[in-house]
Image: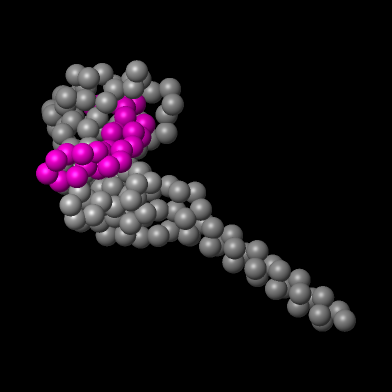
Amino acid sequence: MKHGVLLGSMAAVVTVVGGIFWAINAWEYQQIGESQVRRHLVRGVVEIKRDNHWKASFIVDPRAPLLTRDDLKRITISDIRWGDAGLLCATATTTPGKPLEGRLAFVIEITETGNGKRIRDRGIRQTLAWQGGAKIPFVLPTDLFKPIRNQTTLVHLEPIE
């Protein structure tokens, strides 16, 4: 009887420790174009590998200042690529000058190629801290389906008003 209780207790401890280990290390990895990205399956955090280190593309700061339209004109988005589970990778190129720090909205539109008819869109608010005069690869969780062959992705930036 005592051995059964002991074995049951040990099994419970192993299950709990294994569950904690899994929850801490539950990363899903993807290669999206030139970028390596990962998403934490429990917390939903996404990171991109830059300079051999995993980094979040955006910061969490709800009190950050709002970026203006003039600030947004300093950012060019290129190299848009889709991964699985609605992850969008792109490169932001900023013009030289002061760092861009603040809140903005990414507007992602998926349209039909040719006639430009909007199929679906999403506005996503983020806070960024990017250096001026830099190329910054980033990953953005959109929860949108990956576009199919006859669809085009447009990404533009809007100030939050």
- The quadrant of the picture occupied by the C terminus is top left
Above or below, 124 against 79 in this view is: above
Q: Is residue 111 left or right of residue 23?
A: left
Q: Is residue 3 visible?
A: yes
As for residue 97 lying within the magenta part, the answer is no
Exactly how many numbered labels are in the figure?
Answer: 0
Which residue appears at 24% of the width and 30% of the height?
Answer: 157
**Is 8 situated above or below 68?**
below
Front position in the image: 15 or 143: 143
Can you give x and y, in whole percent of width and height, for residue 127 in the image? 35, 31
Q: Is residue 109 magenta?
A: yes
**Quadrant (top left/top right/bottom left/bottom right) for the N terminus:** bottom right
Report the colour scheme: one colour
Report the span colored magenta: 99-125
Q: Residue at x 81, y 80 (%)?
A: 4
Residue projecting furthest to the right: 1
Place of residue 8 in the rendered image (x, y in percent of width and height, measured from the top left): 76, 74
User: In the image shown, does 142 or 149 lie closer to the viewer?
Assistant: 149
On the rendered structure, is 105 left or right of 60?
left
Q: Quadrant of residue 99?
A: top left
Q: Residue at x 19, y 45 (%)?
A: 112
Residue 61 lies, in percent from the top left, at: 42, 29
Q: Position of residue 153 (x, y in %)?
A: 21, 44
Instruction: Report whether residue 36 is seen.
Output: no
Magenta stretch: dominant secondary structure: strand
Residue 5, image quadrant? bottom right
- Left or right: 161 in relation to 44: left
Residue ID at (24%, 38%)? 118
